[in-house]
Structures are given as C-alpha cells and as structure tokens.
Image (tube, helix red, strand yellow):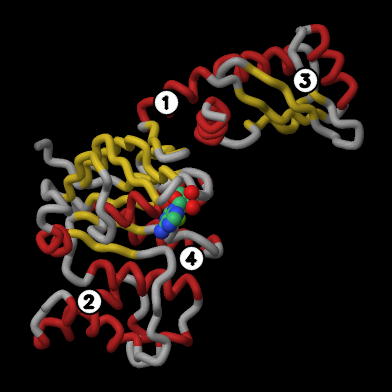
C-alpha cells in the first residue's frame, strides 16, 4: 500500500439511525498539514476516533502508517499521536508530572522520560511552567500541552480534533508554528475544524467533509476556479464608481448606508481587468479586495451543492 500517513477508503459508520460516515475517502501525506473542515455533525470526530483506534468502522479500509487499526490497534498507537477535542487536564498535576504520566503510558523508560519531558516543554514553549500546576495554564498553553502529550512517543502520524477552537490569534500562530515544524520533520498531520479560517493558514491542503463524505483538495481547486467571487470596492466618489460599473454592465450591490460596493466577477483575472478598467475610467479607487477567500467560496459551493 502507498506510503501515506493516513489512508481511508469507503469508510462507513452508523450510530443507530444516523450515518455519521457514508463512504469517506481520505489521504494524509507525510510532511504536510492536512485540514479536515466541515460543519458540526459532518463526521470529523467520528473519523478521527476511527483513525485513533478508538472506534471501529462498520466497513471500509483504514491504514495508519500502513497499518490496519482494526487488526493491530497496538501497532497503530505506537506510531500515532492523538489529541481529542476535549481532554482531561488532570488539573491538580504539575505540568512535568502530567507529561511524565503519558510517557509512562507509552512505556518510555523512566530515565529517558525526564529528558523527553524537558525536550517537549521546550518544543511547546512551556519550560517555565514545568513545576507549576496544569490549572494555571491559559487555554492556548493547555492546547500546546495537549500537543506535547500527543508527541511523547515521537509519532509519525499526528491527529488533532479541533485544536484551534477558542484560541486567540497569538495562540493560533504558536499552534501553527508547532504543527508546521512537525510536518517539516516528516510527520503526517491531520487537524479538524468547523471553522475554515482557523486552519487556512495552518494547512497545506484542505479536505472538506459534509454529511459523512469528503471532497479532496483537488476538487477544491476545481470548485475554486469554477466559482465566481465577490469583491468589495471603495472609491473616493461612490457615485462615480456606481456610474462606471453601470456603464460596464458589471453586476453590483450598493448597500444604501455603506460607502462600498460589492461586485461579482467570474474569476481573479476578471477582477484584475475590472480594477484597471475602473482606474482608466477615472474612478479614484481606494479599496479593492475579495470578500472571503477563494477556499471559503469553494467551501460554500461544496456545502450548497449538497443541500
Ligand atoms: N456516539 C454517538 N452516538 C450517536 N450519534 C453519534 C455519536 N457520535 C456521533 N454521532 C452523530 O454522528 C454525526 C457526526 O458526528 P461527529 O463525528 O461528532 O461530527 P463533527 O465532529 O464533524 O461535528 C452527528 O450526527 C452526530 O450526532
Ligand atoms: Mg467534532
């Protein structure tokens, strides 16, 4: 089987009457951060639990680092690190003890565990908290401790469920740097979120999931170019802008109270042509920016397509 961190083919899982996964395919390559993005209830956690050996699929094929989690959960756990969406933080423990506890769970010998914990605390920028109780950590610091916990045994595959949830921008940047560094070392990283913008800057590729099926980033690219996008335009003289758009027969929306106009264009190239056209018409443009990202348009198109 191909050398991929995670491979899933036709994975199905039902809970009573709900089909959480209905034939999902996914590839997570080594050396990259892959984002799994989809609305609440899309099946992300169900999939991650299956990949983490904590839930069995009803059918379909799964390989983690080439190993079948159903046939050999132990071997998968030795190669895979897992951070659940909510994790007990054992608040009374000292940060160092917390990580030592997980080293023990992964049977790392005691003499090595101490050095490993120091190394991990450096890696996640928490060395000054080594001897302080876990409950003094901020949300972002706890998330980084969670990543450290998932890394104790140097896994080749790292799975994180909603790691960026509730993080402030600085903590998000720190999380991004941490995950990107893991990918740079060759780890296959898979992170989920129901908020695309949380992961857009972290991930190399995005896989959308909705109602138990996934669409690969290749499809995302196609959706992206096929989707017309919206741009926000501002000019010193709003009336001159509207007049120029009308002459050019460009569809626009001009909210009464707003000092900006929204236009729909077929592609980025059409947007560039429009901007130079407006300037040539003598419109003094001071703002011209896409509303949302191209990925966001693709995501909306994907979820719309299915509703
Ligand atoms: N243990 C469970 N029992 C019953 N239904 C569940 C269980 N876990 C998940 N589901 C259902 O499966 C669907 C997918 O849930 P989940 O994988 O948690 O989605 P996500 O993580 O994308 O929000 C939802 O409809 C959810 O209600
Ligand atoms: Mg979830």
Q: Which mark is residue 171?
A: 4
To which residue does mark 3 refer?
A: 252
Q: How many marks?
A: 4
Q: Nearer the viewer, residue 24 or 135?
A: 24
Residue at disc 1, secondary structure: helix
User: Which of 246/80 is in front?
Assistant: 80
| Residue 30 visible, this orientation | no
Q: Classify the position of the C terminus by image quarter.
A: top right
Q: CA distance from mark 1 to mark 2?
A: 39 Å
Q: Is mark 3 within 8 Å of ligand 1?
A: no
Q: Give the label on residue 108, or none.
A: none
**Residue at the spot of label 1:** 221
Name which of mark 3 and mark 1 comes first in the sequence: 1
Compared to 186, does 125 lie above or below?
below
Question: Of circles 1 and 4, which is in front?
Answer: 1
Mark toward the start of the polypeptide (1 vs 4)? 4
Q: Residues within 10 Å of mark 3 (few under 14, many from 20)?
A: some
Image point 31% across, 57% down: which residue? 49
- The disc, 3 or 2, on the residue closer to the chain's N-terminal end is 2
Q: Look at 30% across and 78% down and name the residue there.
A: 121
Give how far apart the Cα atoms at labels 4 and 3 are.
38 Å
Query: The N terminus appears in which quarter of the rendering?
Result: top left
Gap in angstroms between the C-alphas marked 3 and 2 = 56 Å
Residue 119 disc label: 2
Left or right placement of residue 222 versus residue 284 in this view = left
Q: Is residue 123 left or right of residue 105?
A: right
Note whether ligand 1 is within 8 Å of mark 1: no
Horizontal and vertical percent position of residue 273 = 62, 14
Q: Is residue 134 above or below residue 50?
A: below
Give the camera-side residue of 71 and 109: 71
């Amino acid at each position: 089987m191909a050398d991929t961190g995670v491979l899933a083919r036709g994975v199905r899982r039902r809970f009573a009457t709900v089909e959480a996964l209905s034939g999902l395919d996914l590839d997570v390559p080594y050396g990259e951060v892959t984002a799994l993005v989809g609305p609440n209830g899309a099946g992300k956690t169900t999939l991650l639990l299956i990949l983490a050996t904590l839930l069995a699929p009803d059918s379909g094929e799964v390989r983690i680092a080439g190993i079948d989690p159903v046939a050999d959960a132990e071997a998968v756990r030795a190669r895979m690190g897992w951070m659940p969406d909510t994790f007990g933080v054992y608040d009374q423990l000292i940060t160092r003890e917390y990580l030592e506890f997980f080293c023990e769970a992964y049977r790392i010998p005691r003499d090595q565990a101490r050095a490993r914990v120091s190394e991990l605390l450096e890696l996640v920028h928490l060395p000054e908290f080594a001897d302080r109780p876990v409950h003094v950590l901020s949300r972002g610091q706890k998330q980084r401790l969670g990543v450290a916990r998932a890394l104790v045994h140097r896994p080749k595959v790292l799975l994180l469920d909603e790691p960026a949830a509730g993080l402030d921008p600085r903590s998000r940047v720190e999380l991004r740097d941490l995950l990107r560094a893991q990918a740079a070392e060759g780890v296959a990283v898979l992170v989920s979120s129901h908020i695309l913008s949380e992961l857009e800057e972290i991930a190399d590729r995005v896989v959308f999931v909705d109602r138990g099926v996934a669409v690969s980033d290749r499809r995302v690219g196609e959706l992206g170019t096929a989707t017309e996008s919206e741009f926000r335009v501002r000019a010193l003289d709003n009336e001159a802008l509207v007049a120029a758009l009308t002459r050019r027969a460009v569809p626009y929306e001009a909210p009464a109270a707003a000092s900006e106009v929204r236009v729909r264009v077929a592609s980025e190239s059409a947007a560039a042509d429009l901007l130079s056209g407006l300037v040539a018409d003598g419109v003094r443009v001071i703002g011209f920016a896409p509303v949302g990202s191209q990925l966001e348009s693709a995501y909306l198109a994907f979820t719309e397509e299915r509703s």
